[in-house]
Amino acid sequence: MMSAPDPLLMPGQLLARGVCRHLSAGHGFAVIEEFVPERGKRVDVMALGPKGEIWVIECKSSRADFLSDGKWQGYLDWCDRYFWAVDEQFPTDLLPDGTGLIIADAYDAEILRMGPESKLPGARRNALVRRFAVHAARRLQALRDPGALLDGAG
């Protein structure tokens, strides 16, 4: 029996959880929520695939949430594929052509439209994979030792 969604998570975070579950269990991706690829940018989900591919997924819980996001195009330089994740009630005709589409809930997701591929330059990919690894390690350390002070934590 499926339990009720976590009341402490916001709607977009619940979508991100379903997306992360789907990408890691169904496609072998390592995933991080609320990842900062560079100062001033924070993506909802960054996923690192089994072949080194990098996907960015922005989770939008409502029409207003989507319409208030004017910065999404700045994330295109930080991934090989870009996706929107929305629930099944979201008006998907609002979403720009040339982007991927994932329908999600708090427990799972389904990729309905693959985002077009635009390969990252090698130097940027290398730096991003290193930043991803450091970020993931710091998050794990913070879970294991919540009292630890993490230099440059994020």
Image (tube, grey):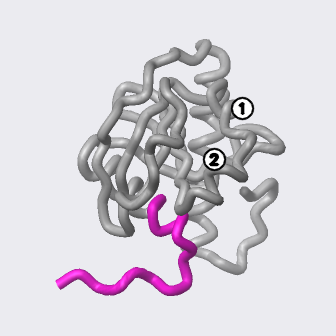
- In the rendered structure, the answer to whether residue 110 lies left or right of residue 96 reads left
Q: Quadrant of residue 60?
A: bottom right
User: Residue 125 at x, y = what percent?
Assistant: 59, 23
Q: Quadrant of residue 63?
A: bottom right
Label annotation for residue 33: none
Q: Residues within 10 Å of mark 2 (few under 14, many from 20)?
A: some
Question: Are circles 1 and 2 on residues that touch, CB within 8 Å?
Answer: no
User: For the point 53% across and 49% down, which residue is it?
Assistant: 45
Q: Amino acid at mark 1?
A: Gly
Is residue 135 visible in the rendered structure shown here?
no
User: Residue 47 at x, y = what percent?
Assistant: 47, 42
User: For the point 35% across and 51% down, which residue is it?
Assistant: 103
Q: Eyeballing the image, is 60 above or below 30? A: below
- In the rendered structure, the answer to whether residue 125 lies left or right of residue 87 reads right
Instruction: Residue under label 1, please give it.
Output: 74
**What secondary structure is found at the residue carrying circle 2?**
strand
Q: Which of 89/36 is in front?
A: 89
Q: Which of 51/147 is in front?
A: 51
What stretch of residues is rendered in magenta?
A: 1-16
- Comparing marks 1 and 2, which lies closer to the viewer? 1
Q: Eyeballing the image, is 66 above or below 130? A: below
Q: Amino acid at mark 2?
A: Val
Is residue 86 visible in the rendered structure shown here?
yes
User: For the point 57% across and 43% down, which residue is it?
Assistant: 133
User: Residue 144 at x, y = what percent?
Assistant: 55, 73
User: For the point 56% across and 28% down, which residue is it?
Assistant: 79
Instruction: Residue under label 2, please give it.
Output: 43
**What secondary structure is found at the residue carrying circle 1?**
helix
Q: Which of 53/3 is in front?
A: 3
Q: Is residue 148 magenta?
A: no
